[in-house]
Image (spheres, grey):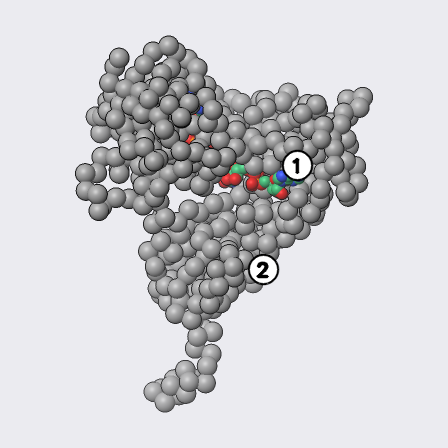
Amino acid sequence: MKEYDLIVIGMGPAGMAVTAMASNMELDVLAIEKHKVGGECLNYGCIPSKALLKAGEMHDVTDNLEKYGIDFQGKTEVNNPLEIVQNKLDQISGSKTMKAFEKADLILNEGNAEFVDENTVQVGGNKYTSDNIFIATGTEPFVPPIPGIEDVPRLTNLNLFEQDEVPDELTIIGGGAIGSEMAQAFSRLGSEINVIQIDDHLIPAGDKEAGQVLEEAFTAEGISVYNDTSIEKIEQRDGTIYTHTDKGCFSSDKILVATGRKPVLEPLKLDNAGVNYDKQGIEVNQKMETNVNGIYAVGDCNGQSLFSHAAMHQGMIALMNAINPLPFKKFKRDDYVVPWSVFTKPEVAQAGLTEQEAQEKGIDYQIIKEDYEDYGRTIADGKTEGFVKVITNSKGKIFGATIVGEAASELIHEWVLAIQHDIKMFDLMMTQHSFPTISLLNKRVAEQWMMKKTDSDFAKKLAKTFI
Ligand SMILES: Cc1cc2nc3c(=O)[nH]c(=O)nc-3n(C[C@H](O)[C@H](O)[C@H](O)COP(=O)(O)OP(=O)(O)OC[C@H]3O[C@@H](n4cnc5c(N)ncnc54)[C@H](O)[C@@H]3O)c2cc1C
Ligand SMILES: NC(=O)c1ccc[n+]([C@@H]2O[C@H](COP(=O)([O-])OP(=O)(O)OC[C@H]3O[C@@H](n4cnc5c(N)ncnc54)[C@H](O)[C@@H]3O)[C@@H](O)[C@H]2O)c1
C-alpha cells in the first residue's frame, strides 16, 4: 500500500488548486478523479456557460448597431455555437490542464474513491494511505420533487452544452445564476425563453433591486420571467413538454432544470472514516478541516460558497493550514470576503452584505448609490442601465456592495479589497481612478458619501470660519 504526503479526491477547481500547490512544494501527492479533470467548472459549468454567453453577445451586437448610428443590412444566422463551445473545452482540457499533474500521481477514470478508514482511500481495487486527505468532490444538480419531472426528458448543466442545436423553445426552471445566464445566452441565440421560479426576484441570493434591473433587461430582450410561481406538474405529450403552474401552462421543446445543487457524498463512504456530514455537505470548521484530524473538505462539497474562486481559495487555505505547524497562526475561512458575479448583461456582482442582509443583522447603515445613467462614460458606451450600491455608515466603514451594470464583475473587486482590509470610504475617495474608466463609478460613490457627510450645518460653518 503506497503512502503519500497528501491524497486529493476530485479534480475540479478545489482539488486541482490543492494538487498544483502541494506538488509544486515537492510534496508527494496522489490526485484521484473519477470522471474528467477540471470538474464541473471546466466541463459543464463556468467555462461552457461563459463561452455560450459570448456567442449570444456576439449575435446581439448586430441587433443593436443602430443605437450607435450604424445601419446593418446583412443577415446573421446561428449555426453551431454549441459545437464551438465543445471545441473550446477540448482546447482548455488538453496539455495545459494536464500540466498541473506533472509532479503528482493521477488516477483518472477508475471509479469513485472511497474511504476505508481515516487514513486509507481505495480506488480501482487499490488502497492508498496518507495523514492528509483532501475531499473536493463537488456537487450535482438538485432536481426538486415536482410531480412528473422524473418522467420527462430534461436538461441540466450536465447535458445542456452537449445538445446538437439551440432549442426553439426552452422553459427554464430557476432564476438563479444558472437559470439567468442560460436564459440570456439561449435567448440571444434564438430560443424563446420562459423563466419560472419560486423566488420573488432574479438571482435570489443577491440584492432585490439588482434582480429587478436584470428582469427589466430580460423583458426588453423578450425573455419572459415568472416570479413567485409554483409548479404543479410537468408532463410530455407528442414531443412537447408542458409545465403546469399557478400562473398558467408553458409548453416548450425542452426544459432546463436549474434549481440549485446537492453534494455527492454516498460513494465516498465517509462513515468508514468517521467524517460528519449532512444534506448540505461535509461539515468543516474555519480551517476547512472536518471533525477528523487531517481530513479536509474544500469547494462545493462542504456547501459553503458554491463558486470556483471560493473552491480554489478554500483549497489554498486548507493546504496552508495542513503544512503550518503553528496552531495559533491558522488561516480562517471567514477572514476572506467571497465575491460573486453573474455574467448576464447587465452583470450582477456582490461583495459582503446585501441591503436586505444588513437590515436583518440590525446594522445601523446608510446606502450610497450611483446610477450608471449619470456618468459620461457609460452614456458614451450606451450602457446606462444599473447602479453601484454600497452599504456603509457615517464613519465610512463598508459592509457590502452590490453592482449591476456593465463590467460589474470587474468593479466589485475594489469593494472586496476594501471590506477585507477595512479600507474606509474616505480612503477610496482619496484614491485616484483613471478617467473615464467605468471603475471610476466606485470613487464617485465614495465622493457622494463624503458630500453627504459635509452637507451639515456644522461642516458648513467650519468651512466658512477657516476659509
Ligand atoms: C452552469 C454553471 C456555471 C457556473 N459558472 C460559474 C462561474 O461563472 N463562476 C464561478 O465562480 N462558479 C461558477 N459555477 C460554480 C462552479 O462550477 C463550482 O463552484 C466549482 O466547480 C466547484 O469546484 P469543486 O472543485 O468544489 O467541485 P467540482 O468542480 O464539482 O469538481 C468535483 C470533482 O470531483 C469528482 N468526484 C466526485 N466524487 C468523486 C469520488 N468519489 N472520487 C473521485 N472523484 C470524484 C467529480 O467527477 C468532479 O470532477 C458554475 C456552475 C455551473 C453548474
Ligand atoms: N456566475 C456564477 O458565479 C455562477 C453561475 C452559475 C452557477 N453558479 C453556482 O451554481 C449554483 C447553482 O446555481 P442555480 O442557478 O442552480 O441555483 P440558485 O440557488 O442560484 O437558484 C435556484 C433557483 O431555483 C429556483 N427554484 C428552486 N426550487 C424551485 C421549484 N421547485 N420550482 C421553481 N423554482 C425553483 C429558485 O427560485 C431559484 O431561482 C449557485 O449557487 C452558484 O453558486 C455560479
Residue located farthest toward the top when viewing the structure as drawn: 125
Image quadrant assignment for residue 434: bottom left
Instruction: Give the CA distance from mark 1 to mark 2.
Output: 32 Å
Residue located farthest toward the bottom when viewing the structure as drawn: 465
Residue 130 in the image, given as x and y percentages of width and height: 26, 23
Report the residue at 29% width, 23% height from top.
119
Q: Earlier in the sequence, mark 1 or mark 2?
A: 1
Report the residue at 43% width, 18% height from top.
112
Foreground of the two, 178 or 303:
303
In this rendering, the answer to whether 101 lies above or below 465 is: above
Res 438 label: none
User: Left or right: 64 with respect to 350?
Assistant: right
Image quadrant assignment for residue 295: top left
Residue kind at label 1, given as amino acid type: Ile
For label 1, count other residues whose C-alpha is less than 10 Å away and answer few (under 14), some (14-19) or many (20+).
many
Residue picked out by circle 2: 373
In this rendering, the answer to whether 219 lies above or below 426 is: above
In what quadrant of the picture does the N terminus appear?
A: top left
Disc 1, SS:
strand
Look at the image and tell me whether residue 390 can be seen.
Answer: no
> Nearer the observer, disc 1 or disc 2?
1
Report the residue at 54% width, 50% height from top.
206
Foreground of the two, 135 or 80:
135
Residue 211 in the image, given as x and y percentages of width and height: 60, 50
Image quadrant assignment for residue 250: top right
Residue 449 in the image, given as x and y percentages of width and height: 45, 69
Residue picked out by circle 1: 173
Report the residue at 34% width, 44% height from top.
286
